[in-house]
Image (cartoon, rainbow, N blue to C red):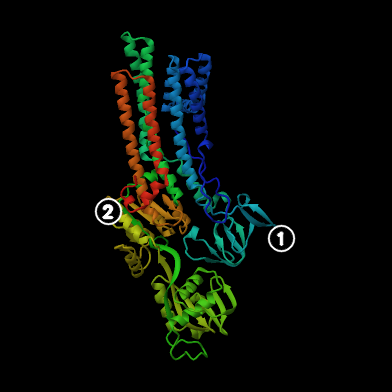
Amino acid sequence: MSSTLTDPAASVTAGRGAAAPRRRTRVFALPEARWATAALVLFLIALPLQLTGAPAWAWVPLYALAYATGGWEPAWAGLQALREKTLDVDLLMIVAAIGAASIGQVMDGALLIVIFATSGALEALATARTADSVRGLLDLAPATATRLLDDGGEETVATADLVVGDTLLIRPGERVGADGRVLDGASEVDQATITGEPLPVAKESGDEVFAGTLNGTGSLRVKVERDASDSVIARIVAMVEEASETKAPTQLFIEKVEQRYSVGIVLATLAVFGVPLAFGASLTDALLRAMTFMIVASPCAVVLATMPPLLSAIANAGRHGVLVKSAVVMERLGQIDAVALDKTGTLTEGTPRVTDIRPLPGAGLPGAGLAENGLTEDGLLSLAAAAEHPSEHPLARAIVTAARERGLVLPDVGDFSSSPGVGVTAVVDGRTVAVGAPARLLTEADSDTADPDVLLAVGELEDGGRTAVLVQCDGVPLGVLGIADRLRPDAAATVAALTTLTGTAPTLLTGDNPRAAARLAAEAGITDVRAGLLPQDKVAAVREAEAAGRKVLVVGDGVNDAPALAAAHTGLAMGRAGSDLALETADAVIVRDELATVPAVVALSRAARRLVIQNLVIAGVFISGLVIWDLVGHLPLPLGVLGHEGSTVIVGLNGLRLLRDAAWRRAATPAGTEDAR
């Protein structure tokens, strides 16, 4: 009754970063389903032949084939377990089916085999759908790369064939094919998926780059430093594969009890057979009662009670962008009663926007007659947006967007140029306008442009957690723009939903300064703010809460969040902005960076736990009722088979309920945070 998760990331080979299309395993693509179907068809052919009085040679072979097709896999699994000196329900069911056939109950044994095989197929389906859901979620690495040859030529090769020491050519707009180091060239690389930095990072000779990150407008020559199997992306895929190898504590407890329970069933079956026989019962009646007892007392439904709901919840979460690494994690998510959130990249979306426009006192356009009154905010923003308009840099897009939101008309520009890590220059109305990093522009400018007002404005913005952008005209500073992340649109709703789920408002743990943290926390509806924290301080805050008896869920994305993610009862990492260390440390990954999925997956976990309890109750009621019926009265073998295996099918189907999208929708609604049944 068990199956293993096949490689869920086998297709993580192609693409330029777009999510892989959702693929669902067809039922008949599963070997278990094909064998169960074959057994069912053979049974349905043989049954009417037997009931209509056909000769035995017409239907007995069909039943025998049904035994073989539906029973060979559980029989083999049972023998493998027996070789390891363990006894499981697979072997018990096969023994019961053979025992039924040995006393002439061939049809009853075949029915047992068919329903038992169907139960196994249901479990395999739940496992396969889990694999479907996580396959392709992290399809970031390109399928091919351009490798440079010693003679100066180039060739296109599969990224899996790259070896340490190869030199790659990364053209503008391409994804990096392997982890390595830049040998030549300059560009800006968007590596938010790996390091968590919301803005592209300038790369030049000697800088490290990662597989799956997106190159900007420059061209790079990169030396491969890690094999494909050891890249950051490969390690993420390995995490996915490991998810299939874990079992929830409830499941482990059931399996531990199952061993002793199965031995007890064998001994009890011998007693049910031997005691009536000793008191004069016929051999056939005693054996029939014993076989019926073995069937109805076997814990098939109990064994199937735990994993299908948890696997279904993992699959459903995966389809909606939450990669839960194991059944243990899915079970633990439903236990949390406190939440700690990081700020940058978690509550904020990583999309910069202009927050401050500060023309310098007395600054104006040389020769434009504006030196006396200075430049207005709109004038400063218009110049900066005109110069940045041809650029594709996120900071440039933020500046242009801010100008458009104000309805500003941008003048035409010429002689545009961009320097990675420095900024842009362009000729606007005959004047050279430069927009970029203050440290770089001031270094390159004349010493008298390092005005104290510039340094003061830059310092204030940077102290407030903003990125400062200096605007110059003909080498003269005109003003400074402040750019910062924006709060995720669903942040406030997420905070409210988590408060409803746990009964306690989330805590904000951040390394940012208290003023910036308090301002953002107020927008999100968080009152408990702890700012200026180092990584060890975040860990201390988590341990303090857990020492008070709380089970804390930590949501973060950066390297500095990794210790807290590891220390928490459960850790969730933001997948797109998350650093590789955070992704490895966290128990689950929010692949699509949708913060609203946090309360949804917690609610889904609680729904899965409720289904586990329901399944255990269903299994217990059926087993108890059928056992009492068989011992006190006379339970016909066909009814015993239908009752026992029927309960197994009911439990399996009940567990698969969480595969439906409706289960996620209920979990994702405010009402669903309380009940995601």
Q: Nearer the viewer, residue 364 or 550?
A: 364
In the image, is residue 648 above or below residue 575? above
Residue lying at 42% horizontally and 61% vertically, measured from the top left: 345
Residue 231: x %, y % from top left: 54, 52
Residue at left 71%, top 60%?
152
Q: Which residue is mark 1?
A: 152
Query: What element does badge 1 sit on?
Result: loop
Q: Confirm or deny contact between disc 2 and disc 1 (CB under 8 A).
A: no
Q: Which mark is residue 518?
A: none
- Rendered residue at 55%/47% (across/down): 11
Estimate the x, y position of residue 323 in percent, counting from the top left: 44, 49
Quarter of the image holding residue 413?
A: bottom right
Q: Is residue 436 left or right of residue 339?
A: right
Position of 416 relative to 642 (above/below) = below
Say which mark, if any, is on residue 503: 2
Does residue 601 appear in this view? no
- The residues bearing labels 2 and 1 have C-alpha atoms spaced at a distance of 65 Å
The earlier-in-sequence mark between 2 and 1 is: 1
**Where does the C terminus fall, quadrant-wise?**
top left
User: In this view, which residue lies farthest toward the right?
Assistant: 151
- Mark 1: which amino acid? Gly
The quarter in which the N terminus is drawn is top left
Instruction: Say left or right for 17 vs 289.
Output: right
